[in-house]
Image (cartoon, coloured by chain):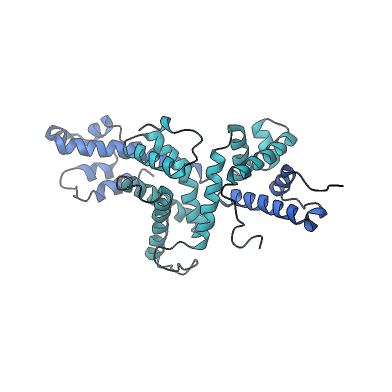
Amino acid sequence: MNDHLEPEEFAEIAATRTVPPSHVAGCEPCADELKSFLALTSRLRAMPDAPEALSERARIYYPRRRALDDLVASMAMDPALRARLARDPAVVLREAGLEPSPELIAALTDGERDDSGAGLRLAASLWF
Amino acid sequence: MSLRSIPEAVVDEKGADDELAHACIGGDARAWDELVRRYGSYVYAVATRAYRLEPQVAEDVFQDVWIRIYDGLARYRGDGTLRAWIRQVTISACQEHFRRSKKLGVVEPLEEAGAAPAAVTDLDEALDVRLAVNRLSSPCRSTIEMAFFDDLTQAETARRLGAPEGTVAARVSRCLRRLREDLQEKPVQPPSGEMR
């Protein structure tokens, strides 16, 4: 009589963490097969999902940073835009699709800006 | 380059990652979403499981890593793999946290500057499996995700899928078999510290 288990039976044992039939301990191919499935399920459990709220903030960061980078690039080319931003930063930021936070306004306003862009990155990091 | 042009069943991880990176640089928000989906859990796991950071600290590191990825993508040349670069960015962020907080030595010390602890290697192997799950059929993928990534019980998975528990159990087993077949080209070895 063949007591060997089918692959999906090994998979079920590994998934449910149940005790395997006694045959497995004395059957080297079966033990190896079970070990392979246990390694697989162990890997699956080793990396749960990151918290959804965190992932969502990472997703949202990209379009906002793109909008900010585009705005900064436009400012470099367009003196009129720079003047508008100095006059009414909240309006310009909203037009660019950005929430006019005090940190962002400060980072974009003449006199507050630094060449390295560190201030902008710091302001953008607050979106997280 | 649009993410739409990327085949659903991508076997060539580096090719797919390079395409993702270029799409992100080109302004494709869907590519960025895919990047976060593909590597978000890996980044978080390196922080919480390999470096054992508290959740609040891990959140700060996670945020820092994604900002660095955004800022650094334009300089990514594809010489190595995107995964290796993200790993290094994450390890650097974790190490900087320890340097800043002067708590070096709380976790396993690194053998040399920039080298990843063994736990990160284990997570790389777990990521191989996770990426293989992405290649499964949609019903298999969602079942495996609920059962293992969301850590739902069989009863909870069955409720969420609207299927009898027995059906879900059979599906989990069938999908695990398929997953293993997919990985046969790159066999999964027992993680360190287990099944010796």
Residue B14 in percent (x, y) is at 43, 45
Residue B110 in percent (x, y) is at 45, 67
Q: Quadrant of residue A83?
A: top left
Furthest residue toward left: A79
Residue B24 in percent (x, y) is at 35, 38
Nearer the observer, A95 or B196: B196
The residue that appears at 46% across and 54% down in the rendered structure is B58
Furthest residue toward right: A1
Q: How many marks?
A: 0
Evaluate whether residue B41 shows in this view. yes
The correct choice, above or below, for B83 with respect to A65 in the image is below
Rendered colour, chain A = blue
Left or right of residue B85, residue A101 in this image: left
The residue that appears at 68% across and 54% down in the rendered structure is A35
Rendered colour, chain B = cyan
Left or right of residue A58, residue B49 in this image: right
Work out which quarter of the rendered image holds the C terminus of chain A and state it: top left
Evaluate whether residue A86 shows in this view. no
Left or right of residue B182, residue A19 in this image: right
The residue that appears at 48% across and 63% down in the rendered structure is B117
Nearer the observer, A84 or A46: A46
The residue that appears at 59% across and 61% down in the rendered structure is B192
Left or right of residue B85, residue B195 in this image: right
The correct choice, above or below, for B190 with respect to B28 in the image is below
Residue B64 in percent (x, y) is at 38, 51
Q: Quadrant of residue B5?
A: top left
Q: Quadrant of residue B34?
A: top left
